[in-house]
């Protein structure tokens, strides 16, 4: 049985979701973080070889999540099927994602924001939809990186220059920047954090 200790802003998994752990030798959060990061590194290698640009669709979104977490979780790439404290109602996830992709398409056409701000706004919206049981922040950060790097030709974000899976100053700043975007529609702190 794994010892679940969740850092600030993390959504606890349900019993059904924890039953989807494929690596039964994992017993602690640190072990889980290690194996998830190993899987994410494999996904990043795949991205480096494929350099996808057609990323604004549900099929790619799911595929990337499965590539990032499919060696660890049986439900990787599958949308959550329960309500959580953050995130849109689970039954509306496909509709919310379609609206997000349509909105980003409009941003690409009309350019109301800088490339970095489009990436940060995309990340924030995707995080707020919270489509998967786990890994939403990491997945949304990688999706935003793909948007700014493969679509806009800019360097990927640095996201505070530190890992965000454990409690600490960087994670606290990140969570606070997300909350500022949630509550005040002020993307400045998140934009600053993304490039710090």
Image (spheres, rainbow, N blue to C red):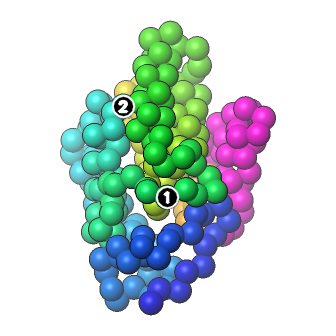
User: In terms of secondary structure, where does tag 1 sit?
Assistant: loop
Q: Earlier in the sequence, mark 1 or mark 2?
A: 2
The residue indicated by pointer 1 is 82
User: In terms of secondary structure, where does tag 2 sit?
Assistant: loop
Residue 94 in sight here: yes
Name the residue: 58% across, 40% down.
124
Q: Which mark is residue 35?
A: none
Name the residue: 40% across, 67% down.
37
Residue 158 in sight here: no
Name the residue: 33% across, 33% down.
57
Please give the range of residues in magenta: 167-196
State which quadrant residue 168 falls in. Answer: bottom right
Residue 38, percent from left and from top:
34, 68
Q: Nearer the viewer, residue 73 or 186?
A: 73
The residue indicated by pointer 2 is 56
Question: Vertical placement of 37 versus 111: above or below?
Answer: below
Q: Nearer the viewer, residue 50 or 185?
A: 185
Q: Residue furthest left?
A: 49
Residue 111, percent from left and from top:
52, 13
Q: Nearer the viewer, residue 129 or 177?
A: 129
Residue 43, percent from left and from top:
30, 55
Q: Quadrant of the N terminus?
A: bottom left
Q: What is the chief secondary structure element of the magenta stretch? A: helix
Magenta includes 138? no
Q: Residue furthest top?
A: 110
Magenta includes 183? yes
């Amino acid at each position: 049985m794994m010892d679940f200790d969740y850092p600030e802003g993390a959504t606890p998994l349900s019993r059904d979701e924890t039953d989807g752990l494929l690596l039964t030798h994992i017993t602690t959060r640190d072990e889980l973080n290690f194996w998830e990061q190993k899987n994410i590194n494999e996904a990043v290698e795949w991205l480096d070889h494929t350099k996808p640009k057609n990323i604004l669709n549900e099929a790619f979104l799911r595929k990337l999540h499965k590539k990032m977490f499919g060696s660890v979780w049986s439900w990787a790439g599958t949308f959550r099927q329960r309500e959580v404290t953050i995130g849109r109602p689970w039954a509306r996830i496909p509709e919310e994602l379609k609206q997000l992709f349509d909105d980003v398409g409009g941003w690409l056409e009309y350019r109301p924001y800088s490339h970095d701000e489009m990436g940060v706004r995309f990340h924030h919206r995707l995080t707020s939809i919270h489509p998967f049981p786990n890994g939403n922040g990491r997945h949304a950060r990688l999706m935003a990186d793909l948007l700014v790097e493969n679509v806009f030709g800019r360097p990927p974000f640095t996201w505070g220059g530190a890992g965000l899976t454990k409690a600490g100053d960087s994670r606290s700043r990140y969570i606070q920047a997300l909350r500022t975007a949630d509550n005040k529609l002020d993307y400045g702190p998140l934009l600053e954090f993304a490039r710090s």
